[in-house]
Image (cartoon, rainbow, N blue to C red):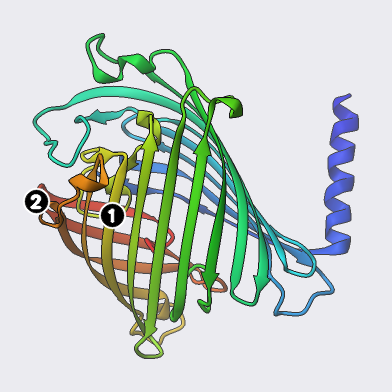
Amino acid sequence: MKRKLLFLLLVTLFAIQLIAKVDWAAYPAGGYSDETDLSFGLLAYLRFSPKIQDSSKKINSAYFLSKYTLKKQFLFALNTEIFSTNGKYKLNSNLEFRSWPTTFYGIGNNTNLDNSEKYTPESYSLDFELSKKVFSKLSVSIQTNLSSFQVNKIKNNSELSIYKDRSQASALGVGVFWDNRNAQFYPTKGFYGEYKVNFSKDLFFSDYSFTQHFFDFRQLYKLSAKSVLSWQFVGALSSGSVPFFKKYRLDYYMRGIPANLHIDDNFSVLRSEYKIFPLNGHYSQRIGFATFLESGSVFNKLENFQIEDNKINYGFGFRYTIIPEDKLNFRFDVGFGENGHILTIMASEEF
Protein backbone atom coordinates (compact mmCIF):
# COMPACT_ATOMS: atom_id res chain seq x y z
CA MET A 1 0.00 0.00 0.00
CA LYS A 2 2.79 2.44 0.89
CA ARG A 3 4.52 1.76 -2.42
CA LYS A 4 1.27 2.42 -4.31
CA LEU A 5 0.76 5.72 -2.51
CA LEU A 6 4.35 6.76 -3.21
CA PHE A 7 3.97 5.84 -6.89
CA LEU A 8 0.70 7.83 -7.12
CA LEU A 9 2.40 10.86 -5.54
CA LEU A 10 5.31 10.72 -7.98
CA VAL A 11 2.97 10.39 -10.98
CA THR A 12 0.94 13.35 -9.75
CA LEU A 13 4.03 15.53 -9.33
CA PHE A 14 5.26 14.54 -12.78
CA ALA A 15 1.87 15.36 -14.34
CA ILE A 16 1.86 18.77 -12.69
CA GLN A 17 5.28 19.50 -14.16
CA LEU A 18 4.00 18.60 -17.63
CA ILE A 19 0.93 20.82 -17.56
CA ALA A 20 1.98 23.64 -15.28
CA LYS A 21 4.74 25.95 -14.31
CA VAL A 22 5.70 25.49 -10.66
CA ASP A 23 7.98 27.86 -8.75
CA TRP A 24 8.80 27.41 -5.10
CA ALA A 25 11.06 28.79 -2.41
CA ALA A 26 11.71 28.05 1.25
CA TYR A 27 13.21 30.29 3.92
CA PRO A 28 14.00 30.09 7.62
CA ALA A 29 11.13 31.77 9.49
CA GLY A 30 12.94 33.12 12.51
CA GLY A 31 11.55 36.11 14.35
CA TYR A 32 11.04 37.86 17.64
CA SER A 33 8.25 39.50 19.61
CA ASP A 34 7.61 40.15 23.29
CA GLU A 35 4.94 37.46 23.30
CA THR A 36 7.10 34.76 21.70
CA ASP A 37 10.72 35.67 22.49
CA LEU A 38 12.88 34.18 19.72
CA SER A 39 11.06 31.95 17.24
CA PHE A 40 12.33 29.46 14.68
CA GLY A 41 10.62 27.78 11.77
CA LEU A 42 10.14 27.38 8.05
CA LEU A 43 8.31 29.52 5.50
CA ALA A 44 7.65 27.77 2.19
CA TYR A 45 6.05 29.44 -0.83
CA LEU A 46 4.66 27.71 -3.93
CA ARG A 47 3.40 29.37 -7.11
CA PHE A 48 1.47 27.27 -9.61
CA SER A 49 0.10 28.31 -13.01
CA PRO A 50 -0.61 26.70 -16.40
CA LYS A 51 2.35 26.82 -18.77
CA ILE A 52 0.18 28.32 -21.53
CA GLN A 53 -0.89 31.46 -19.75
CA ASP A 54 -0.32 35.16 -20.40
CA SER A 55 1.35 37.30 -17.74
CA SER A 56 -1.86 39.17 -16.91
CA LYS A 57 -3.47 36.05 -15.42
CA LYS A 58 -3.57 35.50 -11.66
CA ILE A 59 -1.07 33.05 -10.16
CA ASN A 60 -2.20 30.27 -7.83
CA SER A 61 -0.19 30.16 -4.62
CA ALA A 62 0.27 28.30 -1.37
CA TYR A 63 2.13 29.24 1.81
CA PHE A 64 3.26 26.91 4.55
CA LEU A 65 4.47 28.23 7.91
CA SER A 66 5.71 26.21 10.85
CA LYS A 67 7.06 28.00 13.91
CA TYR A 68 8.33 27.13 17.39
CA THR A 69 9.33 29.69 20.02
CA LEU A 70 11.51 29.75 23.11
CA LYS A 71 8.30 30.07 25.16
CA LYS A 72 7.25 26.60 23.88
CA GLN A 73 4.65 27.98 21.50
CA PHE A 74 3.92 26.09 18.30
CA LEU A 75 2.15 27.18 15.11
CA PHE A 76 1.34 25.30 11.91
CA ALA A 77 -0.43 27.15 9.09
CA LEU A 78 -1.24 26.44 5.44
CA ASN A 79 -2.75 29.15 3.23
CA THR A 80 -3.80 28.70 -0.40
CA GLU A 81 -5.15 31.02 -3.09
CA ILE A 82 -6.57 29.32 -6.21
CA PHE A 83 -8.02 31.12 -9.26
CA SER A 84 -10.32 29.79 -11.95
CA THR A 85 -9.06 29.76 -15.55
CA ASN A 86 -10.93 32.94 -16.48
CA GLY A 87 -9.98 34.66 -13.21
CA LYS A 88 -13.58 35.32 -12.16
CA TYR A 89 -13.50 32.98 -9.18
CA LYS A 90 -11.00 32.74 -6.34
CA LEU A 91 -10.87 30.22 -3.51
CA ASN A 92 -8.92 31.12 -0.37
CA SER A 93 -8.34 28.60 2.39
CA ASN A 94 -6.53 28.77 5.70
CA LEU A 95 -5.75 25.84 7.97
CA GLU A 96 -4.11 26.53 11.33
CA PHE A 97 -3.15 24.67 14.49
CA ARG A 98 -1.79 26.60 17.46
CA SER A 99 -0.56 25.56 20.91
CA TRP A 100 0.36 28.87 22.44
CA PRO A 101 1.28 29.47 26.12
CA THR A 102 0.55 33.15 26.79
CA THR A 103 -0.85 35.64 29.30
CA PHE A 104 -4.40 36.72 30.17
CA TYR A 105 -5.05 40.23 31.53
CA GLY A 106 -8.84 40.33 31.45
CA ILE A 107 -11.38 41.82 29.05
CA GLY A 108 -11.71 45.46 28.03
CA ASN A 109 -9.83 48.63 27.16
CA ASN A 110 -8.61 49.39 30.71
CA THR A 111 -6.75 46.19 31.57
CA ASN A 112 -3.14 46.48 32.72
CA LEU A 113 0.04 44.42 32.87
CA ASP A 114 -0.08 44.07 36.68
CA ASN A 115 -3.19 41.87 36.61
CA SER A 116 -2.03 38.79 34.73
CA GLU A 117 -2.13 35.01 34.70
CA LYS A 118 -0.52 32.39 32.49
CA TYR A 119 -2.55 29.93 30.45
CA THR A 120 -2.07 27.62 27.45
CA PRO A 121 -4.74 27.69 24.73
CA GLU A 122 -4.86 25.03 22.03
CA SER A 123 -6.84 25.89 18.92
CA TYR A 124 -7.69 24.64 15.45
CA SER A 125 -9.26 26.70 12.69
CA LEU A 126 -10.28 26.13 9.10
CA ASP A 127 -11.48 28.90 6.79
CA PHE A 128 -12.78 28.86 3.23
CA GLU A 129 -13.74 31.86 1.16
CA LEU A 130 -15.10 31.67 -2.39
CA SER A 131 -15.25 35.01 -4.17
CA LYS A 132 -16.56 36.00 -7.58
CA LYS A 133 -15.47 39.04 -9.54
CA VAL A 134 -18.60 41.00 -10.46
CA PHE A 135 -16.63 43.37 -12.63
CA SER A 136 -13.09 44.68 -12.86
CA LYS A 137 -12.54 45.81 -9.25
CA LEU A 138 -15.64 44.59 -7.39
CA SER A 139 -15.99 41.09 -5.91
CA VAL A 140 -18.50 39.34 -3.67
CA SER A 141 -17.88 36.29 -1.51
CA ILE A 142 -19.29 33.59 0.71
CA GLN A 143 -17.17 32.27 3.54
CA THR A 144 -17.20 29.68 6.28
CA ASN A 145 -15.15 29.27 9.44
CA LEU A 146 -14.69 26.36 11.81
CA SER A 147 -12.89 27.01 15.11
CA SER A 148 -12.09 24.76 18.06
CA PHE A 149 -10.61 26.03 21.33
CA GLN A 150 -9.51 24.59 24.66
CA VAL A 151 -7.54 26.00 27.59
CA ASN A 152 -4.91 23.94 29.38
CA LYS A 153 -2.90 24.84 32.49
CA ILE A 154 -5.24 27.43 33.98
CA LYS A 155 -6.28 28.26 37.55
CA ASN A 156 -9.65 26.89 38.65
CA ASN A 157 -10.92 30.38 39.57
CA SER A 158 -9.86 31.95 36.28
CA GLU A 159 -12.35 33.65 33.96
CA LEU A 160 -11.10 31.22 31.30
CA SER A 161 -11.78 28.05 33.30
CA ILE A 162 -15.07 27.62 31.38
CA TYR A 163 -12.92 26.71 28.36
CA LYS A 164 -11.22 23.72 30.03
CA ASP A 165 -13.54 21.57 27.94
CA ARG A 166 -13.20 22.00 24.20
CA SER A 167 -15.51 24.59 22.65
CA GLN A 168 -16.28 25.15 19.00
CA ALA A 169 -17.68 27.93 16.88
CA SER A 170 -18.68 27.77 13.25
CA ALA A 171 -19.99 30.49 11.00
CA LEU A 172 -21.29 31.27 7.54
CA GLY A 173 -21.02 34.70 6.02
CA VAL A 174 -20.91 36.96 2.99
CA GLY A 175 -18.59 39.75 1.94
CA VAL A 176 -18.04 42.48 -0.63
CA PHE A 177 -14.65 43.82 -1.78
CA TRP A 178 -13.37 46.68 -3.89
CA ASP A 179 -9.69 46.42 -4.86
CA ASN A 180 -7.84 48.53 -7.42
CA ARG A 181 -4.40 48.22 -5.81
CA ASN A 182 -1.50 47.53 -8.17
CA ALA A 183 -0.01 44.57 -6.24
CA GLN A 184 -0.92 41.95 -3.64
CA PHE A 185 1.98 41.88 -1.17
CA TYR A 186 3.45 45.36 -1.60
CA PRO A 187 0.95 47.69 -3.29
CA THR A 188 2.11 51.26 -3.91
CA LYS A 189 -1.15 52.86 -5.03
CA GLY A 190 -4.87 52.25 -5.10
CA PHE A 191 -7.80 51.68 -2.74
CA TYR A 192 -8.97 48.54 -0.95
CA GLY A 193 -12.35 48.24 0.77
CA GLU A 194 -13.79 45.19 2.51
CA TYR A 195 -16.96 44.43 4.43
CA LYS A 196 -17.81 41.00 5.84
CA VAL A 197 -20.55 39.70 8.08
CA ASN A 198 -20.42 36.25 9.70
CA PHE A 199 -23.27 34.47 11.45
CA SER A 200 -22.54 31.80 14.05
CA LYS A 201 -25.60 29.78 15.04
CA ASP A 202 -26.46 26.53 16.79
CA LEU A 203 -27.67 25.07 13.50
CA PHE A 204 -24.11 25.44 12.16
CA PHE A 205 -22.83 23.01 14.87
CA SER A 206 -21.64 25.93 16.99
CA ASP A 207 -21.68 26.16 20.78
CA TYR A 208 -22.41 29.89 20.50
CA SER A 209 -24.73 32.27 18.65
CA PHE A 210 -23.32 35.62 17.60
CA THR A 211 -22.85 37.93 14.63
CA GLN A 212 -19.70 39.82 13.63
CA HIS A 213 -19.38 42.69 11.14
CA PHE A 214 -15.85 43.47 9.93
CA PHE A 215 -14.64 46.56 8.00
CA ASP A 216 -11.27 47.25 6.36
CA PHE A 217 -10.52 50.34 4.24
CA ARG A 218 -7.05 51.20 2.88
CA GLN A 219 -5.70 53.94 0.62
CA LEU A 220 -2.18 53.99 -0.82
CA TYR A 221 -0.35 56.90 -2.44
CA LYS A 222 2.79 56.44 -4.52
CA LEU A 223 4.88 59.48 -3.57
CA SER A 224 7.86 58.51 -5.74
CA ALA A 225 9.29 55.48 -7.53
CA LYS A 226 10.68 54.26 -4.19
CA SER A 227 8.24 55.48 -1.53
CA VAL A 228 4.58 54.98 -0.58
CA LEU A 229 2.26 56.55 2.00
CA SER A 230 -0.75 54.53 3.19
CA TRP A 231 -3.57 54.71 5.72
CA GLN A 232 -6.04 52.15 7.00
CA PHE A 233 -9.26 52.13 9.01
CA VAL A 234 -10.14 48.69 10.35
CA GLY A 235 -12.81 47.74 12.86
CA ALA A 236 -15.54 45.31 13.89
CA LEU A 237 -18.95 45.30 15.57
CA SER A 238 -20.38 42.20 17.23
CA SER A 239 -23.67 41.13 18.78
CA GLY A 240 -24.74 38.05 20.70
CA SER A 241 -22.67 35.78 22.94
CA VAL A 242 -19.12 36.10 21.56
CA PRO A 243 -16.75 33.50 23.09
CA PHE A 244 -13.32 34.55 24.30
CA PHE A 245 -11.50 32.95 21.37
CA LYS A 246 -13.55 34.93 18.83
CA LYS A 247 -13.10 38.33 20.48
CA TYR A 248 -10.75 40.90 18.92
CA ARG A 249 -7.22 41.61 20.13
CA LEU A 250 -6.00 45.18 19.76
CA ASP A 251 -2.37 44.04 19.42
CA TYR A 252 -3.29 42.34 16.12
CA TYR A 253 -3.71 45.81 14.63
CA MET A 254 -1.44 48.07 16.72
CA ARG A 255 2.29 47.47 16.98
CA GLY A 256 2.85 49.12 20.38
CA ILE A 257 0.29 47.05 22.34
CA PRO A 258 1.49 44.03 24.39
CA ALA A 259 -0.07 40.75 23.28
CA ASN A 260 -3.53 40.04 24.75
CA LEU A 261 -3.56 43.24 26.81
CA HIS A 262 -6.78 44.66 25.32
CA ILE A 263 -9.49 42.21 24.14
CA ASP A 264 -13.21 42.74 23.54
CA ASP A 265 -16.20 42.17 21.23
CA ASN A 266 -15.60 45.32 19.15
CA PHE A 267 -12.67 47.45 18.07
CA SER A 268 -11.63 50.31 15.80
CA VAL A 269 -8.15 51.32 14.61
CA LEU A 270 -6.96 54.15 12.37
CA ARG A 271 -3.32 54.05 11.27
CA SER A 272 -0.89 55.38 8.68
CA GLU A 273 2.51 54.24 7.43
CA TYR A 274 5.28 55.60 5.24
CA LYS A 275 7.72 53.18 3.52
CA ILE A 276 10.74 53.84 1.33
CA PHE A 277 13.34 51.67 -0.45
CA PRO A 278 15.97 54.34 -1.20
CA LEU A 279 18.96 52.29 -2.43
CA ASN A 280 19.85 51.20 -5.98
CA GLY A 281 22.38 48.33 -5.69
CA HIS A 282 21.65 44.80 -6.84
CA TYR A 283 21.12 43.63 -3.25
CA SER A 284 20.82 46.96 -1.41
CA GLN A 285 17.63 47.80 -3.34
CA ARG A 286 15.95 45.13 -1.21
CA ILE A 287 16.50 47.25 1.93
CA GLY A 288 13.74 49.60 3.04
CA PHE A 289 12.56 51.66 6.00
CA ALA A 290 9.18 52.55 7.52
CA THR A 291 7.56 54.88 10.04
CA PHE A 292 4.01 54.55 11.38
CA LEU A 293 1.36 56.17 13.61
CA GLU A 294 -1.63 54.23 15.02
CA SER A 295 -4.68 54.97 17.19
CA GLY A 296 -7.37 52.56 18.39
CA SER A 297 -9.35 50.89 21.17
CA VAL A 298 -11.59 47.93 22.04
CA PHE A 299 -15.08 48.25 23.55
CA ASN A 300 -17.96 45.98 24.56
CA LYS A 301 -20.81 48.04 23.04
CA LEU A 302 -20.95 50.75 20.40
CA GLU A 303 -22.56 53.20 22.82
CA ASN A 304 -19.55 52.78 25.13
CA PHE A 305 -17.05 53.83 22.48
CA GLN A 306 -15.22 57.04 23.42
CA ILE A 307 -12.58 58.51 21.13
CA GLU A 308 -10.64 59.78 24.15
CA ASP A 309 -10.13 56.13 25.18
CA ASN A 310 -8.03 55.47 22.08
CA LYS A 311 -4.49 54.21 22.58
CA ILE A 312 -1.77 56.01 20.60
CA ASN A 313 1.18 54.12 19.11
CA TYR A 314 4.03 55.21 16.88
CA GLY A 315 7.21 53.60 15.65
CA PHE A 316 9.67 52.80 12.91
CA GLY A 317 10.75 49.74 10.98
CA PHE A 318 13.21 48.05 8.66
CA ARG A 319 12.30 46.02 5.55
CA TYR A 320 14.14 43.37 3.56
CA THR A 321 12.69 41.83 0.39
CA ILE A 322 12.96 38.01 0.45
CA ILE A 323 10.98 37.30 -2.77
CA PRO A 324 11.67 40.14 -5.25
CA GLU A 325 9.16 38.89 -7.87
CA ASP A 326 6.25 39.45 -5.48
CA LYS A 327 7.90 42.05 -3.22
CA LEU A 328 7.38 39.80 -0.20
CA ASN A 329 9.23 41.48 2.67
CA PHE A 330 10.57 40.58 6.06
CA ARG A 331 9.72 43.41 8.43
CA PHE A 332 11.38 44.52 11.66
CA ASP A 333 9.09 46.96 13.52
CA VAL A 334 9.47 48.73 16.87
CA GLY A 335 6.21 50.18 18.22
CA PHE A 336 6.06 52.60 21.16
CA GLY A 337 2.99 52.94 23.39
CA GLU A 338 1.93 53.62 26.97
CA ASN A 339 3.54 50.35 28.13
CA GLY A 340 6.97 50.89 26.54
CA HIS A 341 8.10 49.41 23.25
CA ILE A 342 7.28 46.22 21.32
CA LEU A 343 9.64 44.61 18.79
CA THR A 344 8.15 42.50 16.00
CA ILE A 345 10.01 40.53 13.31
CA MET A 346 8.06 38.55 10.71
CA ALA A 347 7.36 38.03 7.02
CA SER A 348 4.77 40.16 5.14
CA GLU A 349 3.70 43.76 5.55
CA GLU A 350 1.35 44.91 8.30
CA PHE A 351 -1.13 46.31 5.77
Mark 2 and mark 1: Cα distance apart in space: 18 Å
Which quadrant holds residue 233?
bottom left
x and y, in percent, of residue 119 in the image? 29, 22
Q: Nearer the viewer, residue 79 or 67?
A: 79
At x 59%, y 75%, the residue is 137
Q: Visible in this render: residue 116? A: yes
Q: So how many labels did they put on this image?
A: 2
Mark 1 Cα shell of 10 Å, populated few (<14), some (14-19), many (≥20): many
Measured along the vertical axis of the image, is residue 337 above or below residue 202?
below
- For label 2, the residue is 338
Amino acid bearing label 1: Ser
Q: Earlier in the sequence, mark 2 or mark 1?
A: 1
**Horizontal placement of 82 versus 40: left or right?**
right
Measured along the vertical axis of the image, is residue 226 above or below residue 62?
below
Q: Visible in this render: residue 73? A: no
At x 17%, y 63%, the residue is 314
Q: Nearer the viewer, residue 153 or 107?
A: 107
Give the quarter of the figure containing the C terminus: bottom left
Give the quarter of the figure containing the N terminus: top right
Amino acid bearing label 2: Glu
Q: For the residue labelled by badge 1, is the local secondary structure a helix, a strand or a loop?
A: strand
- For label 1, the residue is 268
Q: For the residue labelled by badge 2, is the local secondary structure a helix, a strand or a loop?
A: loop
**Horizontal placement of 14 versus 318: left or right?**
right
